[in-house]
Amino acid sequence: MSSGAFPSIDGHSGTQGLNASAGWTYGKNRKTNIFRVNYNHNHVSTTNLYSNGIDVAGNAGIGGLSTDPFDWGLPGINFTSFGGLSEPIPRRELDQTYTISDHLFVESREA
């Protein structure tokens, strides 16, 4: 939970990550095989206090906005003499990578 100048429009940020690797090395005679697998997962999520709850902008009659409850929140308000009023922008990000490598090494014979 974040804490700002206006607690009623704060939000929450969360992250989750995972990295896993596995592999083996096998050798026979003059050959060596190395095999590796890697998986990486990173998830970031930011929401405001109204995400997935109350469609404040829709209830106020402001149209043309997202109908996804994840995106719901207060509209931003700007003032000429004071600081603006805005909340965290909802965001979801998921990055995943898979890596596979296989190497074969053959020892050369010296004459």
Image (spheres, rainbow, N blue to C red):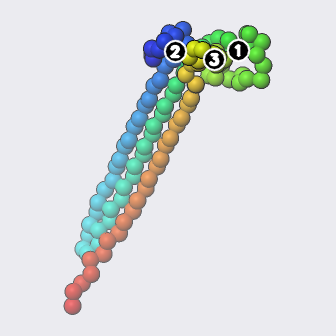
Label disc, if present, on residue 78 of the rendered structure: none
Residue in the picture at 31% in, 56% down: 24
Residue in the picture at 47% in, 23% down: 13
Packing grade of label 2 (10 A; few <14, some 14-19, many >=20) is some
Residue in the picture at 50% in, 41% down: 95
- Element under label 1? helix
Residue tagged 1: 57
Cα separation, mark 3 vs mark 1, equals 22 Å
Label disc, if present, on residue 10 of the rendered structure: 2
Residue 49 visible to an observer of this rendering: no
Residue in the picture at 26% in, 77% down: 107
Cα separation, mark 2 vs mark 3, equals 22 Å
- Element under label 3? loop
Quadrant location of the N terminus in the rendered image: top left
**Looking at the image, which is closer to me, 29 or 78?**
78
- Element under label 2? loop
Residue 22 visible to an observer of this rendering: yes
Looking at the rendered image, the disc whose residue lies closer to the viewer, 3 or 1, is 3
Packing grade of label 1 (10 A; few <14, some 14-19, many >=20) is some
**Looking at the image, which is closer to me, 31 or 52?**
52
User: Which of the two discs, 3 and 1, labels the residue nearer the N terminus?
Assistant: 1
Is 14 displayed left or right of 54 in the figure? left
Looking at the rendered image, the disc whose residue lies closer to the viewer, 2 or 3, is 3
Is mark 2 in CB contact (under 8 Å) with mark 3?
A: no
Q: Give the amino acid type for the residue marked by disc 1 in the picture.
A: Ala
Residue tagged 3: 80
The quarter holding residue 64 reads top right
Is mark 1 in CB contact (under 8 Å) with mark 2?
A: no
Q: Give the amino acid type for the residue marked by disc 2 in the picture.
A: Asp
